[in-house]
Amino acid sequence: MNRHPIIIDTDPGVDDAFAIMMALCEPNIDIRAYTTTCGNVGLKTTTRNMLGLKHLLNLDTAVYAGAEQPLAIPFKDASDVHGDSGLGYYQFSEVSKLSADEYAWDTIYRIAKECNGIDIVALGPLTNIAIALLRYP
């Protein structure tokens, strides 16, 4: 079976964590990377949440951090909705380590080249994708 390659670009709060778990149940997709961005909460927290999910769900897929700020407007998180941790105040006690020092936008470009195109499932703000398009027109 040919599985469809995707990248999940995310700002993991409760909603994205659920979407990621649902994606893992789909046998026809091949998640090549998770890229994190600021959104529901700041980048440090969204990346920690994704690394916590990676550890909890025993995922092999790499995680790459991306944009700390939006490109054109001031950053405003949604911690009033998602809690300070982005996960309803839940804090992961154990997290995996980042897969590499490569930025999310460089990862998007690299994997798109490797796969001769890729679909991106954008669960958060589109900043990483915008930076990838600006850097690699």
Image (cartoon, rainbow, N blue to C red):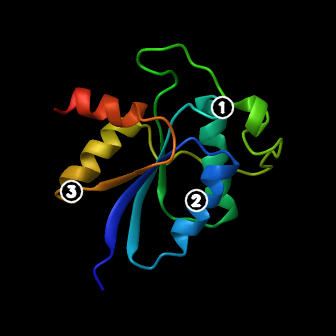
Left or right of 117, for residue 62 = right
Along the line of sight, the residue nearer the viewer: 70 or 65: 70
Residue 23 vertical position relative to residue 132 in the rendered view, above or below: below
In the image, what residue type sits under mark 1?
Val
Q: Which residue of the protein is positioned furthest toward the front in this rendering? A: 81
Q: Which residue is rendered at x = 83% and y = 41% of the image?
A: 89
Residue 134 in view of the camera:
yes
Residue 26 vertical position relative to residue 89 in the rendered view, above or below: below
Where residue 86 appears, as percent x and y from the top left, is 72, 39
Left or right of 92, for residue 101 = left
Q: Which residue is rendered at x = 52% and y = 67% of the image?
A: 23
Secondary element type, mark 3: helix
In the image, what residue type sits under mark 3?
Glu
In the image, what residue type sits under mark 2?
Ala
Q: Which mark is residue 114?
A: 3
Left or right of 109, for residue 46 = right
Left or right of 18, for residue 64 = left
Residue 3 sits in quarter: bottom left
Residue at numbered disc 1 = 41
**Crowd class of label 2 (few under 14; some 14 to 19; many from 20; radius 10 Å):** some
Secondary element type, mark 2: helix
